[in-house]
Amino acid sequence: MAKKLNLTLKVWRQNGPRDAGRMETYPARGIDEDMSFLEMLDVVNEELITQGKEPIAFDSDCREGICGTCSLVINGVPHGGRKGTTACQLHMRNFKDGQTITVEPWRARPFPVIRDLVVDRGAFERIIQAGGFISVRTGGTPDANATPIAKEIADKAMDAAACIGCGACVAACKNASAMLFVAAKVSHLNLLPQGQPEKNRRAQKMVWQMDREGFGACTVTGSCEAVCPKEISLDFIGKLNRDYAGALLG
Amino acid sequence: MKLTAGLFQSSLGRKYLMAASGAALVLFVIGHLAGNLQIFLGRDVINDYGEFLHTRPALVWSARIGLLAMVGIHIWAAISLSRENRAARPVAYAQWSPTVASYASRTMLMSGLIVAVFIIYHLLHFTTQTPAVNFTGQDFAAFAEPGEGGEPRRDVYRMMVVGFGQPLVSLFYVVGVGLLCLHLSHGVSAMFQSLGLKNKSWGLTLDKAAKAISVAVFVGYASIPAAVLLGLGKEVVK
């Protein structure tokens, strides 16, 4: 029989994009410690609905840590601070009975709050549209090994491609900088042979779009890497800095 | 055009300018320290060094103009980026944890601005030798000693001894270089990241080296007012 927890939640409530919003306090009683953080919110919402109140709006999709949809700042840390873990994979056994937990949305001007804990991450989509792709001729499927790629390069590109675009890096950064996301997306394609023809244009356009969206700059504090559920390395930011310099000179 | 816009308008470009100007300023800070530490080699040595600089106005003025340009670029980049950084988070978190972000990395703007005020004071104190700011009632510009051939020359040694003989002035210097070194403990390693020259294979070594350099610079600079307050050069102020 799993242990039950009684908790106090302080949650950001905001009726819509134009509402000022405020923190509200709710009890979370009889929470199974094997529940995920999102399941705990589901239980609280059931209770709110029973009482005729508006449930807390929050984003979720796969609930298995691979889609990047959940976006909660828990006790001041995006995704709650467990290494390499999204909020949906954070279990209540990581909390203590009687604890007060604050839950807030990602805070960044380019991520406006839609409602409560749900933010609009369209800015990331527009950065991808600016250059996060390769242009290929359509036609027959190429042979699997037609383009040889060294294992080290493939591994590194895969490490960058692991980014699920959740935006925790922006939420954690004191400047709300999107450098880790952009660095991962630029590096993923710039490392691979298929990405070479558009390498410079990609770095330049994605950086410009990032700036245009209103994200802050990188101060090299390292907090993005620390909270990244996919543990994307700061080394990619160094690579983006090199690639962008190369694009300016090239 | 692409290069100019990329450097001066994009966030990454302004970080390159910040890092490159910062690198030039760090090299000056180390060179200036090496020059000043000659006070421990005696009055003749440091006064020879002062004379060496003063008889080469072309060298000194090119360095000054270069440094002023570097300071200008560094401060302009810092202020323009900081404004955007603040605008990027209009609503603050009710609870926010810095996780691994160091105190130095979170306070770069403030430590930098206080150091800028300290530098202005330092220039008025020892470069323009404005009597009103030295709080000793003496005019440093009038300090002279007989040089080679009996010609009077600047007495840098006496200026430093009298100047740092004021405990509050010395304390301000120690605070100023303390904040400079806090700034450097982050900046010296972060500039490599901004220029794309840092990675995990030597990043930790670089972080440690940045801290070691900052501590060494602090100890070096603070040793001068400390030595004066402990009696260095008291024979010249009798």
Image: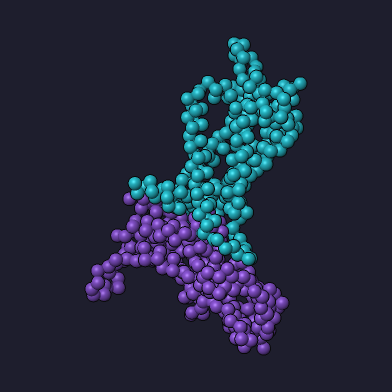
Chain colours: A purple, B cyan
- Residue at left offset 46%, top offset 45%: B17
Whether residue B94 is visible to the viewer of this picture, yes or no, is yes
Residue A117 point in image, percent of width and height: 55, 73
Residue A89's quadrant in the figure?
Answer: bottom right
Question: In the displayed structure, does residue B72 sit left or right of residue A129?
Answer: right
A20 in relation to A8, above or below:
above
B206 in relation to B234, above or below:
below
- Residue at left offset 55%, top offset 34%: B31
- Number of disc labels: 0
Residue B137 point in image, percent of width and height: 72, 25
Residue A102's quadrant in the figure?
Answer: bottom right
Q: Nearer the viewer, residue A108 or A15?
A: A15
Whether residue B99 is visible to the viewer of this picture, yes or no, is no
B223 in relation to B112, above or below:
above
- Residue at left offset 58%, top offset 81%: A55
Question: In the displayed structure, does residue B187 sit left or right of residue B41?
Answer: left
In which quadrant of the rendered image does the C terminus of chain B lie?
Answer: top right
A1 in relation to B107, above or below:
below
- Residue at left offset 41%, top offset 48%: B7
Residue B87 point in image, percent of width and height: 52, 57
Q: Nearer the viewer, residue A188 or A104?
A: A104
Query: Given the current orientation, which residue lies at the most extreme top position?
Result: B149
Question: In the displayed structure, does residue A80 sit left or right of residue A130?
Answer: right
Residue B189 point in image, percent of width and height: 54, 49
Residue A106's quadrant in the figure?
Answer: bottom right
Q: Nearer the viewer, residue B51 or A203?
A: A203
Question: In the displayed structure, does residue B52 sit left or right of residue A135?
Answer: right
